[in-house]
Image (cartoon, rainbow, N blue to C red):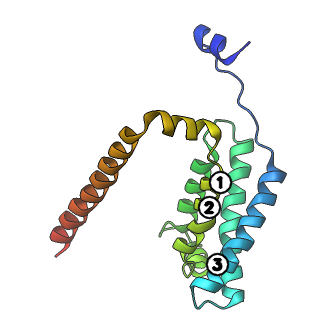
Amino acid sequence: MSADNAAEIGVRPAREKIALLPHFRDLVLISVIGWALQLIATDMSPIAALGGMAGLYAICAGGLVLARFAPFYLPSVAWISLLGIAATVPFVPWDQAVLGVVEEIDFLALSVPCLAYAGLAVSRDEVTIAKRTGWKLAVIAVFVLAGTYLGSAVIADLVLRITD
């Protein structure tokens, strides 16, 4: 039964179980790159950066395990986010221990390998779509970025006015 046929008759198709070992391997590679970038971008000691990256690795690996074995479906990014939130909520007894390990990590430096991978993952289909839409896509992108910036500025201004 195809996914289209399953949707037509109201039956949910079986979700694909993620393979954990390749994901863990990829996480190790990204963690090593992130660790090196922490040493370049910050004044952290190698041991402190290693501890922070190990803490983030543990949260990501735990989220992947939850995504694989949970009795209901949530995307792995949702499980990782929920686990990170649960690990650092102020009223849990271990929040200061987790924050002590990961608080010095520079998340801007961590975004570099993620953005590089996203740039490399652009397929021929996306390039074809961009060529076909041409200048219209650029105009929409400018409006989206400007709207996001202005919306963020308005929200920040409101919050600052409320808290002063």
User: Is 79 above or below relative to 27?
Assistant: above
> Which of the marked residues, 3 or 1, is nearer the chain's N terminus?
3
The residues bearing labels 1 and 2 have C-alpha atoms spaced at a distance of 6 Å
* Residues under numbered marks 1 and 2 in contact, where contact means CB atoms less than 8 Å apart: yes
Q: Using the numbered discs, state the Cα–Cα distance from disc 3 to disc 1 in whole angstroms.
A: 19 Å
Q: The residue tagged with tag 1: helix, strand or loop?
A: helix
Which one is nearer the viewer's eye here, 58 or 111?
111
Point out the frontmost of discs 3 and 2.
2
Q: Earlier in the sequence, mark 3 or mark 2?
A: 3
In the image, which disc is placed on residue 37? 3
Question: Pointer 2: what residue?
Answer: 116
Q: Quadrant of residue 119?
A: bottom right
Tag 1 residue: 120
For badge 1, the amino acid type reads Leu
**Cα separation between marks 3 and 2:** 13 Å
Picture coordinates of residue 138 (x, y %)?
38, 46
Q: Which mark, residue 94?
A: none
Q: In which quadrant will I find the C terminus?
A: bottom left
Count of labels in the image: 3
Residue 47 lies, with reference to residue 109, above or below; the image says: below
Residue 49, picture quadrant: bottom right
Question: What's the residue type where badge 3 is placed?
Answer: Leu
- Amino acid, disc 2: Ala
Q: Give the residue at x 38% y 41%.
A: 135
Whether tag 3 and tag 1 are in contact, CB under 8 A, the answer is: no
